[in-house]
Image (cartoon, rainbow, N blue to C red):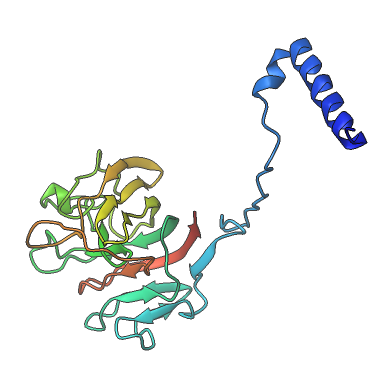
Amino acid sequence: MQSRFYYICILSALLLSIETVADPAKRTEVWKPVPKPVTINQKGIPSDATIIFDGKNFDALLSKDEGDVSWYLRNEVMTVKAGTGDIVTKASFCDAQFHVEWRAPMSRYGDSNQHWGNSGLKIQERYEVQILQSVDNPTYVNGQAGSIYKQYPPLVNASLKAGEWQTYDIIYKAPRFDQNKALVSPAYITLLHNGVLVQNHVEVKGTTKNVGDPSYAAHGCAPLKIQEHTANVSFRNIWARKL
């Protein structure tokens, strides 16, 4: 003998079927799961973001040797201190959205080219989105601002003049490796520079290198590294969302 619950389920299914016939649009409606709400504060930071630098302190950051950060902190702005090395986030990331605001210094250095406003965001400590002053500063195009260093030049040059604040918004998909440490799928990067799309879901060829060809070595989630390259580049309002 069938249970009462069984007949209720049958009846519900019949009613749903009748409703769908009456309104075919309902067949393609999806009601669950309901996306969780995310609010945005006055600084434009999503409520589910990991704060990397908000101008108050270096609490979310470490120096390259995992000690205290020695970069300058003035007026809620972080500026590279030459000779102190790269810094990294305490948090590790796989797939993620990154927001970084940066400013190249007004003064040139040396013969410029790669010396004026040079820094970089090394996602998972390996895959670099280049930072450089790229107005009135000719250089190789896969090394200018908005490039995936030595792999992809930006689609357009969306740079602002030295001394002006610029933004990077990055959507990053981490590479996948199998149990034998072989590459299953590469990393991908989408980059908006000052709101302009300059990298459109490009396939990262491997670790970005100044010399030599890119290659992959298996790894897991890893920190975001911010490069110290002598130039006194400044940063503010850095956050990430794990995807």
Q: From the viewer's perspective, is 71 left or right of 21?
A: left
Most extreme residue toward the right is 4
> What residue sits 88% from the left and 36% below the top?
5
Picture coordinates of residue 151 (x, y %)? 17, 50
Considering only vertical position in the picture, is 161 above or below 66? above
**Residue 225 figure quarter:** bottom left
Q: Is residue 71 left or right of residue 205?
A: right
Q: Is residue 237 above or below residue 200?
A: below
Kindly give the residue lying farthest to the bottom in the view shown. 67
Residue at 36% x, 74% y: name it: 88
Q: Quadrant of the N terminus?
A: top right
The residue lying at 36 percent from left, 61 percent from top is 102
Residue 58 spot, x, y in % from top left: 45, 80
Q: Quadrant of residue 13?
A: top right
Q: In the depicted view, which residue is nearer to us: 177 or 233?
A: 177
Percent coordinates x, y for residue 109 in the rendering: 15, 68
Residue at 42% of width from left, 64% of height from top? Answer: 93
Q: Is residue 193 above or below residue 69?
A: above
| Percent x, y of residue 41 | 63, 57
